[in-house]
Amino acid sequence: MSRLAIEGGKPVREERIPIAQPVIGDEEIRAVEEVLRSGQLAQGPRVEEFERRFAEYVGTEHCVATSSGTTALQLALEAAGIGAGDLVIVPSFTFIATANVALHAGAEVAFVDIDLETYCLDPASLEELLRSLERERRLTPRRVAVIPVHLYGHPADMRPILELAEEYDLLVIEDAAQAHGAEYRGDRVGALGDAGCFSFYPTKNMTTGEGGAITTDDEDLAEAAAMLRSHGERERYDHVELGYNYRMTDIAAAIGLEQLKRLDELNRRRRKNARFYIRELSDLEPEIRLPRERSWAKHVYHQFTIRLDPDALECTRDEFAEALRAEGVDCAVHYPRPLHRQPVYLKRGYHTASLPNSELAARTVLSIPVHPGLSREDLEDVVRAVEKVVTAYSS
Ligand SMILES: Cc1ncc(COP(=O)(O)O)c(C=O)c1O
């Protein structure tokens, strides 16, 4: 095997393959132009249509479009009545927005661990936390919510989570920011809990530039979220709640309507790319651990995230990532620190006991490009680069 590019060898390719790349076509450009020419730029008929179509796609009665995934989560919690003194349970291994929205709502956060196969909330860890809170009589009189995250595009194991929710009267808000079109036992995510929250940030499986959405069958929750989205306004200048401006624009919704038409095809390409990697890279286990799709899941591969085995590789993750980038393959760590170890929580007095799976994942995961813009040649170059780096560092 040739020398690594970081050691002066010839790279697999000169131009770097990006870790993410939105697919924007003439349709999106024309749709935006039409909105710009219409003069109706802020929330209007395009947002309404987008809400209708996105609810239909997910399989819920209602959809409330928002300015981001973060504001969707915050509005969903607040619309469901979560506030000061309440408790919100989140997996520690996720993007920080999942937990921060609970703090913004005035609630307390409790962190639970993940399952290392799916990287999603581990129902056993949730059960353990609930039993101990029950013993300590800390579950009542307040309300308790749980936010399972469908991380990297793989659904969380919702059945046991929903059973615990039933037993303990938990509100379930799905964080589906990374999982548009993913399925759990045949149902689309975002339609499984009390509400689902999506992000349409440009790296996501579909985009609106910036944007988000809440999906729900609960009419009261949808109405409350829509009102909070617009300064708690019931009628023009009649403000009955303390709300925000978290609206989506018609420009964003016009992009979203076109992206929604493409979503299944974009996901099909992500799944095909992932299958190629799984076939071509499986010989490299156990040095690297490949993602798995559980039998009950349809994974939409927002990320293709491998886990490095520190005992089988003579390099740090940073060295591995640098070597891969030098070969012409971008990569990223989602996420390098579990939330229970983030300074913003430590300085608020959160001292969570060890959550070993979240800590291990944060130390060892690395995402490689899987987006739908990759050509066959790109995929082959990624495989060659990963093989080269693993071989060079194998102990
Ligand atoms: C799991 C998760 N939750 C929430 C968010 C927040 O979404 P946004 O960036 O649109 O605010 C993201 C986006 O990165 C995410 O990945």
Image (tube, rainbow, N blue to C red):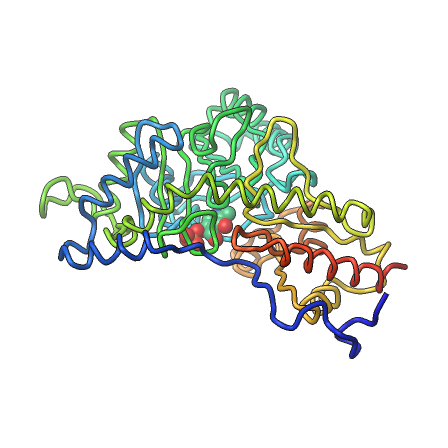
Q: Where is residue 73 in the image (x, y as percent from the top left)?
A: 40, 44
**Looking at this view, is 117 or 185 the one in front?**
185
Q: In the rendering, at what x and y percent does residue 34 appear? A: 20, 54
Q: Which residue lies furthest to the right in this view?
A: 395
Q: Is residue 341 above or below residue 111?
A: below
Q: Is residue 340 left or right of residue 36?
A: right
Residue 97, visible in the rendered structure: no
Q: Is residue 34 left or right of residue 259?
A: left
Classify 68 as above or below 215.
Answer: below
In the image as oriented, which residue stretches furthest toward the bottom?
Answer: 8
Residue shown at 28%/27% (left/top)? 219
As displayed, is residue 217 above or below residue 290?
above
Q: Tell me the quadrant of the picture where the N terminus can be found.
A: bottom right
Q: How many marks?
A: 0
Q: Which of 307 and 327 is in front in this view?
A: 327
Residue 113 point in image, percent of width and height: 64, 41
Q: Nearer the viewer, residue 263 or 319?
A: 263
Q: Is residue 168 something that shows in the picture? A: yes
Q: Residue at x 49, y 35 (%)?
A: 146
Q: Quadrant of the C terminus?
A: bottom right
Determine whether, in the image, residue 79 is placed left or right of residue 266.
Answer: left
Q: Is residue 293 left or right of residue 74?
A: right
Residue shown at 30%/31% (left/top)? 62
Coordinates of residue 251 in the picture (x, y in percent): 26, 54
Q: Which quarter of the picture shows residue 15?
A: bottom right
